[in-house]
Image: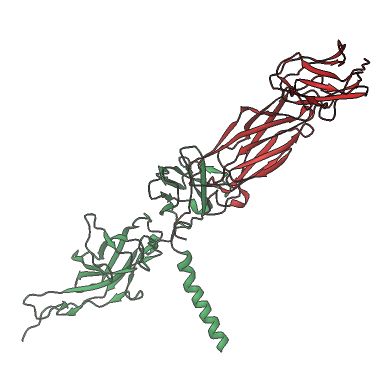
Chain colours: A red, B green
Amino acid sequence: MMLALVIVAGTAMAQGTNTKPYPGGTYHYSLSGIKVATEGTATIAYGGTKATIQNVSLAEKAPSGSKIYVVPNTLTTLTFDMAYDKDATSGKITVTITDGAIAGCSNSIELQIDVQALPTLDLAIAPTTIIDCQKLTTTLVNNQAGSYDQANLENTIVFTVTPNVLHVKDGGAYTYGYTISLPVSTGLKDFAVTYSGPGTYLAGSGTATVSGITNATNANGVFTMKFKTTTGIDPVTITETLSAANLVVTAGNGTYSGDFSINNAVAKVKTMPSIGSFTIEP
Amino acid sequence: MFRLKHIIILVLLAAGYSPTANAQSTARRPYEGAMHAYTCNGISVGAVYNFYITANADGSGYYDDGLTGEFDIINAKGKVGGDGLASTQIQWNAGASLHIYYVWLEATNNGGCSNKISIQITPQINKFDLLSENIPVDNTMSCPAVASTDGFNPLAPAYDAGTTLLKFIVRRVNGTDNKLTAQAGDTYDWSFQPVLSVDPAFSQDISIVSIVGVNSGMLVADVNNLYSVAGTDNEVTVTVAVKNVPGTSQDVKLTIQNQSESRSNLLDSNSANDTVKHRIEVLPVIDRLQGV
């Protein structure tokens, strides 16, 4: 029996981190240079926990999954995937090739797998620009209330979403996104929300999503609410709530639900008293 | 000729219009001495408000009412009720016509937010005037009444020189338009106290017979001898009875005093025309008529 066993880097799915996989990811492995004199078998074992061997390249014979057969006298490459659960532990992958001859001999190879810490995404939202009372014009017109000139009376509230991605190796590629609830009807004049920041912003009715934020564009998301001074209504509470955050680490293609250290931000817009006009004689 | 007629009409219209537009005391152009109400509507219920006055349209130049004599704000602060109104009264005092003022209303709600509004006020010299005149104004002399119904009665059993009735006008100029009523031409009521005298003072038998206004009717004096005239009357006729004194002329003098306008508290601006004189010429002396 002649064996030549080599574990090499996998395909793109592994991205070179298959020996240091992220839990929750799936990584590709390849063992080349296998050659047996008699049809033999291959076994793959993992010394850690919570990892599943998938997509074995060589044919399996009955009972299914019990053995992997290696054709004789042919230089063969064995490929397989390892899907690591989010709570997988480190260990060794051991591949053993056994010649099918009577009292056939075995050869084996090990690859140390160091499962990394679980990647996490944490988002926090907070109002970074708030207003106390709404604006009044500084250029008052005779017998017109200070709140009258709406054109120049734009009030701004800014909410900032701050991301914190952890346990992705330096330079590791990832994308993330989240959903944010936005007020629809506030009673405030010309109320409008704009977004500036990374990713793709898609506004819906009452909610918006931001997706496709990459490690390259990682930055705070800024939601700006503008409205014109509105008088005579009750105080308005503007609440923005984060939800459905997810992180996808490119290496291993693991998907992780995001957490929120602060998922709810509230800004109160104080009521402004109305003033009509003086009704004295001209 | 046609063009000249039009020019004359325009001049007359302008002359007639201008005094009406600018002469009266109004809230925006108050006379010194006048009190006017300032009301703002559309204010949020429950807001507290404060009226104050500044020198400038941008709100700078705050005048401390306690230190500034040119005006007094009455009840500057309050709370807006269900009608959404805030009102105050401002007494404009002497010296106010030297400045332009900005009356501000600031409304603040429970949350501490404020809104404000201002209006420009240009006080004027007081031109409210109550004056007395002859009828017509140049009728300064007349003969004593000798008719039996009004004066000397030659058929009286005992000698009686009789009584002459004189009529004067007390006239109001530049009254304040009363915006509290829809009645066109209505103004605030006005009042005065008539004082009569006669010279020489042989007889103090002089009295007011009546004071009558077209709309006010017969007026009755109050306890202070003040006669109050409805604002719709610009003048009243004062009828005075003077006992005839044969052999001498009599100078009858009607003086009005304590003139004022209701609501605005305006006082008379010109004391020079408060007194009117009328001379009753000499009544010839007759001893007696008898048969000889």
- How far from the left and from the top, in percent, is residue B92? 44, 51
Report x, y in % for residue A105: 88, 11
Q: Is residue B218 visible?
A: yes
Q: Is residue B161 left or right of residue B119?
A: left
Which residue appears at 20% of the width and 77% of the height?
A: B145
Judge whether A116 appears above or below B5 on screen: above
Residue at the far front in the pictured view: A102
- Horizontal side of residue B118 vs A169, given as left or right: left
Residue at the spot 80% in from the left edge and 19% down from the top edge:
A20
In the image, A54 versus A15, the foreground residue is: A54
Q: Nearer the viewer, residue B255 or B43?
A: B43
Image coords of residue A122 (percent x, y): 67, 27
Q: Nearer the viewer, residue B15 or A56?
A: A56
Q: Quadrant of the C terminus of chain B?
A: bottom left
Q: Is residue B162 above or below residue A143?
A: below
Q: Residue at x 73, y 39 (%)?
A: A199
Q: Quadrant of residue B140?
A: bottom left
Q: Residue B1's quadrant in the figure? A: bottom right
Q: Is residue B151 visible?
A: no
Q: Quadrant of residue A213?
A: top right
